[in-house]
Amino acid sequence: MISKTIQPHRKRPLDGAFIHDGIYIPRDLDADYSGGESFLISQLSATGQRNWPKAQTWGLTAEAVSPSQMERISDYLERWESVSFKDRRLVADGLISYHQG
């Protein structure tokens, strides 16, 4: 679930209400969402989480990229070999703009 309105301090109670032992995260796990990166990662799909380290090598930070942006980037990474030159250029231009801004 990706939410643009949820805040880190509100996510912990939601975890307690919806995460049960044996499903994804043990209930007794003391997750810390105070850092922007841990909060972002908690909102990503498994694919987004797997591709987050690659995005970091491009210089992206949790403070500068939203979960929805990371999901789009992750989608491109998963199918990079079949992405058209035009779409690759759009991704590259976006990264250049990000680093200049």
Image (cartoon, grey):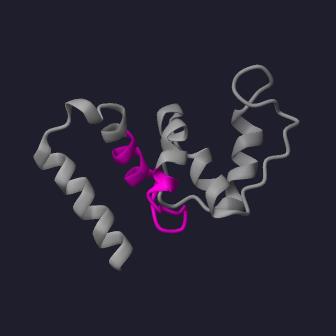
Q: Residue 92: where, in percent of width, then height?
A: 26, 57
Identify the residue at horizontal 38%, vertical 73% (top origin).
Answer: 99
Is residue 20 rendered to the left or right of residue 67?
Answer: right
Q: Which region is colored magenta?
A: 55-74
Q: In the image as oriented, which residue stretches furthest toward the top?
A: 22
The number of numbered badges drawn on the structure is 0
Q: Residue 80: where, in percent of width, then height?
A: 28, 36
Magenta residue check for 62: yes
Identify the residue at horizontal 74%, vertical 50% (top origin).
Answer: 12
Q: Residue 85: where, in percent of width, then height?
A: 13, 44
Is residue 76 rendered to the left or right of residue 54?
Answer: left
Q: In the image as oriented, which residue stretches furthest toward the bottom?
A: 101
Q: In the image as oriented, which residue stretches furthest toward the right?
A: 28
Answer with the quarter of the image where residue 16 lies. Answer: top right
Who is closer to the viewer here, 92 or 22? 92
Compared to 90, does 19 lie above or below? Answer: above
Identify the residue at horizontal 36%, vertical 39% (top origin).
Answer: 77
Who is closer to the viewer here, 78 or 5? 78
Q: Residue 50: where, in percent of width, then height?
A: 53, 36
Answer with the quarter of the image where residue 36 lies. Answer: bottom right
Identify the residue at horizontal 26%, vertical 54% (top origin).
Answer: 91
Q: Quadrant of the C terminus?
A: bottom left
